[in-house]
Amino acid sequence: MFYDSMIKILPSVKLPLKLCKGSYAERIALAKKLNNNFFNHLNEKFTTKEVPFDVFEKTLKECTPGKINVNILEYDRYGGYTCFGLNDSKNGIDKFLIYFRKTPYTEGVRLLETDISLHETSHYFCHLTNPKHSARSVKMHESGLQAKTEDFYREHLYTKNEFKEEDLKQRLNKFLRKFTNEEQIDFLQNCRYRMLEEYIAFDDGQRYLDIIQDRHPDLICEKIYAREKEVYNFPEKIKIVTDKLKEVLQNARKP
Ligand SMILES: [Zn+2]
């Protein structure tokens, strides 16, 4: 796809500006608070084991400050997925798309997949409260850096494969040599925030799956648990990427 100008992030995917202030920790705290509020409202909609997509979407919009365009759509794979929707005629991002699967046996968002649904809404609120990260993703997408680095991210960072610290450090060093300083910084920042936000999303998903089952004992047979947060070794990987980022930034500042 060819873009003749920078893709814009349009107001329908932005929170009121006064809400997006403060440090990263404050903005993440706000995202977590919004996700918690959404959970409490969604929880009340479960009178059966599922909530229809339109009810989920309406509840999410009601729990988002401002007027945000978000659509809940059907996914043909297991799990969930959150992304931006591009409006070609406006050459801008004007909506969020959140995908959940439907199966032959289910019609809505399942109570027992609250780990998945609240994981995705955590991403949604993190995107909303961190517009600069969204802007960086768009820039990486436009410049082609995203396409050149996504395999590395998927194979070595966002993976459950066995984590070997030294091996990852060496692979990262070698991989970075292909890129300019500015590209290295964008890539490392992007990886860092994506992993931080994955970790938060898995954490929220696990917690709310646990709570929702306690609130609806009549709708479940046997309690289930999500255990994904630990298997990715995100804290260790985030440290490696952050240390490398500091090193690259220091070198870039040298005369
Ligand atoms: Zn995720």
Image (spheres, helix red, strand yellow):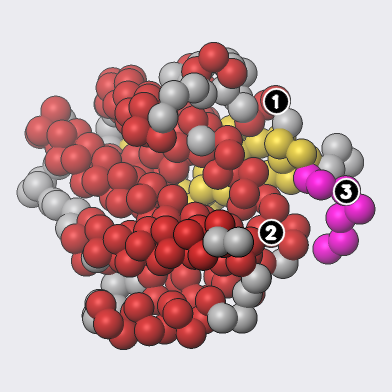
Task: Return the disc, 2 or 1, that comes first in the chain's sequence.
Answer: 1
Residue bearing the label numbered 1? 11
Front disc: 3 or 1:
3
The residue under label 2 is which amino acid type? His
Q: Give the residue type that dot 1 points to.
A: Pro
Q: Is the magenta stretch mostly helix, strand or loop?
A: loop
Q: Distance between the residues labelled 2 and 1?
A: 20 Å
Q: In this view, does 104 lie above or below 150?
A: above
- Identify the element where label 3 is drawn: loop
Residue at x-position 83% and y-position 63%: 1
Is residue 220 at all visible to an observer of this figure? Answer: yes
- Dot 1: within a 10 Å radius of its alpha carbon, few (fewer than 14), some, or many (20 or more) residues? some
| Dot 3 amino acid type | Ser
Q: Earlier in the sequence, mark 3 or mark 2?
A: 3
Where residue 187 sits in the image (x, y, percent)? 55, 62
- Quadrant location of the C terminus? bottom right
Q: Tell me, for residue 141, which label it has, or none.
A: 2
Q: Which region is colored magenta?
A: 1-7
Query: Which quarter of the figure has residue 78?
Result: bottom left
Q: Where is residue 8 in the image (x, y as percent from the top left)?
A: 76, 39
Say if residue 103 shows up in the picture: no
Q: In the rendered image, which residue does mark 3 sit on?
A: 5
Residue positioned 62% across, 49% down in the render: 136
Task: Give 252 or 101, whichever is nearer the viewer.
Answer: 252
**Real-space Cα separation, disc 3 to disc 2, in angstroms:** 13 Å
Q: Position of residue 219 (x, y in %)?
A: 17, 36
- Residue sitting nearer the eye, 253 or 153: 253
Q: Residues within 10 Å of mark 2 (few under 14, many from 20)?
A: some
Badge 2 element:
helix
Question: At 41% across and 35% down in the image, what residue appears?
Answer: 24
On screen, residue 17 above or below 150:
above
